[in-house]
């Protein structure tokens, strides 16, 4: 029997899907502005099916995205909304809150990332706002060593555990989206000592190769993969919208759980889902974990 931390699944994609509105460059932040209660409902749905970690809807709450819409001054208010909704769900179900820190400028675009010292200042604003109210920080969808360094600088000394989640190439799980070998993250892990290292927002098929590398670093590791067919070239353009990404028709809850149970066999102790992996997937994963004799913590 192994103790497994079960994260939630998609937050942003789930919100966009449930809203029924056209996708915008503000992504799930737009949904939260228009219908904040929907955020709390998504958190509740994941807790209800067995997740023990709720991830805040703050992945895309960055000035770089908000300034384009004239909303850069709304960061404190948006953080407050995100925190109020996740705290409501936690009060009802229990569990922990992970403060999400997504890429500053765009996902899967390591070429856009600012200097690490500059990035640390930008991330630092969010860390300061969320630190009193989260149980840990989750640095998500890190595409390059430079991107990782900036976020880790911002969270160093924050007083909360820090989990670092890296996104690898869909066809080669041994390399970050930047093309850099995943194994080179070891130097940053030694320097900043995050409490866990994960792979996220990558095709499930790429995860095993990444985990074989992450397991060598001597700290808790795991994965939460996405359900996209691929990251399209159109999505890598400026201010993309998520309707440029195609959902996989073959990634049903049973198939996703099959992948995830393989990660457990590799030693992973932190599991969840990323884009297009919803409550039904997490429910099936929770069922499979318990059936195999593992304990969800």
Image (cartoon, helix red, strand yellow):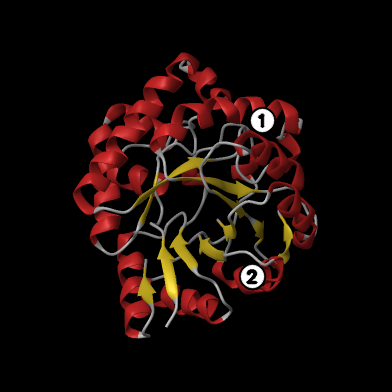
Q: Give x and y (percent) for residue 106.
A: 61, 37
SS label for mark 1 = helix
Q: Give x and y (percent) for residue 162.
A: 56, 47
Q: Quadrant of residue 123?
A: top right
**Distance CA(mark 2)–CA(mark 1):** 27 Å
> Left of 221 or right of it: where is 19?
left
Q: Is residue 79 above or below residue 260?
A: above
Residue under label 2, please give it: 211
The residue sitting at 68% across, 36% down in the picture is 153
> Left of 185 or right of it: where is 226?
left
Label total for image: 2
Using the image, tell me which numbered label, if any, was put on residue 152.
none
Q: Residues within 10 Å of mark 1 (few under 14, many from 20)?
A: many
Residue under label 1, please give it: 120
Residue 20 seen by the camera: no
Q: Is residue 65 above or below residue 163?
A: above
Q: Earlier in the sequence, mark 2 or mark 1?
A: 1
The residue sitting at 75% across, 54% down in the picture is 190
Q: Residue furthest left?
A: 92
Circles 2 and 1: CB atoms closer than 8 Å? no
Residue 36 seen by the camera: yes
- Which image quarter holds the C terminus? bottom left
- Which image quarter holds the N terminus? bottom left
Viewer-side residue, 149 vs 67: 149
The residue sitting at 64% across, 42% down in the picture is 236
Q: Residues within 10 Å of mark 2 (few under 14, many from 20)?
A: many
Q: Give x and y (percent) for residue 96.
A: 36, 51
Task: Single out the mark in the foreground, 2 or 1.
Answer: 1
SS label for mark 2 = helix
Viewer-side residue, 102 vs 243: 102
Q: Quadrant of residue 23?
A: top left
Q: Give x and y (percent) for residue 53.
A: 38, 54
């Amino acid at each position: 029997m192994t103790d497994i931390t079960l994260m939630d699944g998609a937050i942003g994609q789930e919100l966009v899907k449930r809203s029924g509105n056209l996708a915008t460059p503000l992504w799930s932040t737009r949904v939260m502005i228009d219908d904040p209660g929907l955020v709390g409902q998504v958190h509740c749905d994941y807790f209800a099916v067995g997740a023990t970690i709720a991830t805040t809807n703050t992945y895309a709450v960055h000035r770089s995205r908000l300034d384009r819409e004239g909303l850069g001054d709304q960061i404190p208010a948006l953080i407050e909304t995100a925190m109020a909704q996740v705290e409501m769900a936690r009060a009802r179900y229990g569990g922990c809150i992970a403060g999400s820190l997504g890429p500053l400028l765009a996902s899967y675009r390591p070429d856009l990332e600012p200097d690490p010292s500059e990035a640390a200042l930008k991330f630092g604003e969010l860390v300061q706002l969320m630190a009193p109210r989260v149980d840990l920080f989750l640095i998500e969808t890190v595409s390059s060593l430079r991107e990782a360094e900036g976020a880790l600088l911002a969270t160093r000394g924050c007083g909360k555990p820090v989990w670092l989640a890296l996104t690898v190439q869909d066809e080669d799980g041994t390399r970050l989206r930047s093309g850099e070998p995943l194994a080179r993250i070891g130097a940053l892990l030694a320097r900043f000592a995050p409490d866990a290292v994960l792979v996220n927002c990558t095709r499930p098929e790429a995860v095993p190769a990444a985990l074989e590398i992450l397991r060598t670093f001597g700290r808790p590791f795991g994965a939460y993969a996405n359900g996209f067919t691929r990251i399209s070239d159109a999505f890598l353009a400026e201010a993309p919208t998520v309707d440029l990404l195609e959902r996989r028709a073959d990634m049903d809850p049973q198939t996703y759980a099959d992948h995830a149970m393989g990660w457990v066999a590799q030693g992973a102790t932190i599991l969840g889902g990323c884009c297009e992996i919803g409550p039904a997937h997490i429910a099936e994963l929770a069922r499979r974990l318990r059936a195999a004799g593992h304990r969800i913590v």
